Image (tube, rainbow, N blue to C red):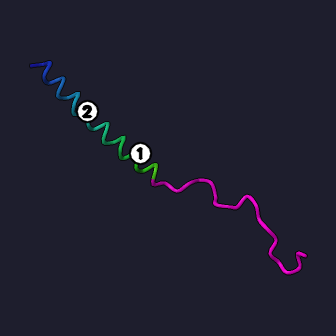
Amino acid sequence: MRTLTAVAITVVAAAALAVAAAFAVVALLDAPPEQPNTPLISYDTSPTGR
């Protein structure tokens, strides 16, 4: 009986850990990127540029 209880507790703990990890991955994927969206190349578009 002790073995069955230990197995049941282990299964429940593993399932809870898997659900928590899934929520953590979804939260990380939903986070906005830290890098700003700035262009690497910019062209001068002013009329006095030429």
Question: Three-letter amino acid code at disc 1?
Answer: Val
Rendered-image quadrant of the N terminus: top left
- Is residue 18 highlighted in magenta? no
Percent of width and height locating residue 11: 22, 30
- Is residue 36 highlighted in magenta? yes
The span from disc 1 to disc 2 (Cα, nearest Å) is: 18 Å
Q: Is residue 45 left or right of residue 22?
A: right
Vertical relation: 50 (above or below) 22: below
Residue at mark 1: 25
The range drawn in magenta is: 30-50
Crowdedness near tag 1: few (<14), some (14–19) or many (≥20) residues, C-alpha within 10 Å: few
Vertical relation: 26 (above or below) 18: below
In the depicted view, which residue is nearer to us: 46 or 21?
A: 46
Give the prevailing secondary structure in the magenta stretch: loop
Percent of width and height locating residue 38: 68, 61
Question: Quick one: SS at disc 2?
Answer: helix
Question: Three-letter amino acid code at disc 2?
Answer: Ala
Q: For the point 18% across and 23% down, which residue is it?
A: 6
Question: Quick one: SS at disc 1?
Answer: helix
Res. 12 mark: none
Residue at mark 2: 13
Q: For the point 13% across and 22% down, which residue is it?
A: 4
